[in-house]
Image (cartoon, grey):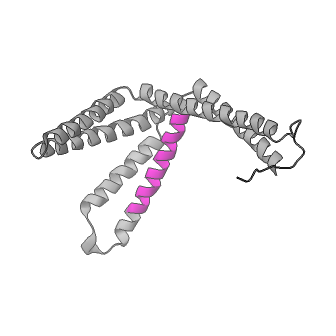
Amino acid sequence: MRTKRHWFSLIAGIFFLACSIFMFANPSAPLTALGIFFSIIVFIGEVLETIRYFFTPASTRSVWSLISAIITVLVGVLLLSASAAAQAAFIPVIVGVWMIIVGLSRLSAGRRVTYLSSGAGKHMVFSGVVPLILGILICLFPVVFGSVVVWLIALALLLVGMVCIGDFFVSRKANRPGPYDDGIIDVEAR
């Protein structure tokens, strides 16, 4: 069983290294795949939400939820028919818009908290300015930031692959009997 585990570490390490090299060589492919996957999930979710709308009682229906579902379905269709470059730019833009919303909400909350505690309010304002600026930059340069994220993930996969391969060699060497090892473990009782 131990030898199979050793080989699994080697195979996993080689797989991680191959994925890392692929991501370094072509950073837009993972972003495109994420964009397509996200578009499909959004499209299916909103189609189901639209269907659910018509099966709920009329007293609990909201016109705004129907309009939101229809607009989201149309955006999903638009994204699914978009080019690979548009898919690669889609995920960073979503993250950028989300960071802008988080930044604005932190700024708003920070201004209100400043009346209660000056230090806490300044901290919240600062913690709102940073994501706001970063979100604006991501929206302005989505492919650059998307590529940086892919490169960071590729670097992490490279490190994990190297650790797995190192684990393979270390664990094989550790399980070999040493020159003074006769198979008996001597534990000294104190």
Q: Residue furthest front?
A: 190
Left or right: residue 91 compared with residue 99: right
- Give the magenta-colored segment's residue range: 30-49
Is 94 magenta? The answer is no
Asked if 116 appears above or below 150 in the picture, the reply is below
Residue 160, by quadrant, is top right
Judge by depth and name the residue closer to the eye, 56 or 98: 98
Left or right: residue 22 compared with residue 104: right
Q: Which residue is drawn at 59% across and 30% down?
A: 23
Residue 49 image offset from top left, x and y in percent: 39, 61
Judge by depth and name the residue closer to the eye, 51 or 107: 107
Left or right: residue 69 compared with residue 177: left
Kindly report the secondary structure that dominates the magenta region of the rendered protein.
Answer: helix
Residue 118 image offset from top left, x and y in percent: 13, 39
Is 43 magenta? The answer is yes
Asked if 113 appears above or below 52 in the picture, the reply is above
Residue 97 image offset from top left, x and y in percent: 32, 38
Residue 112, by quadrant, is top left
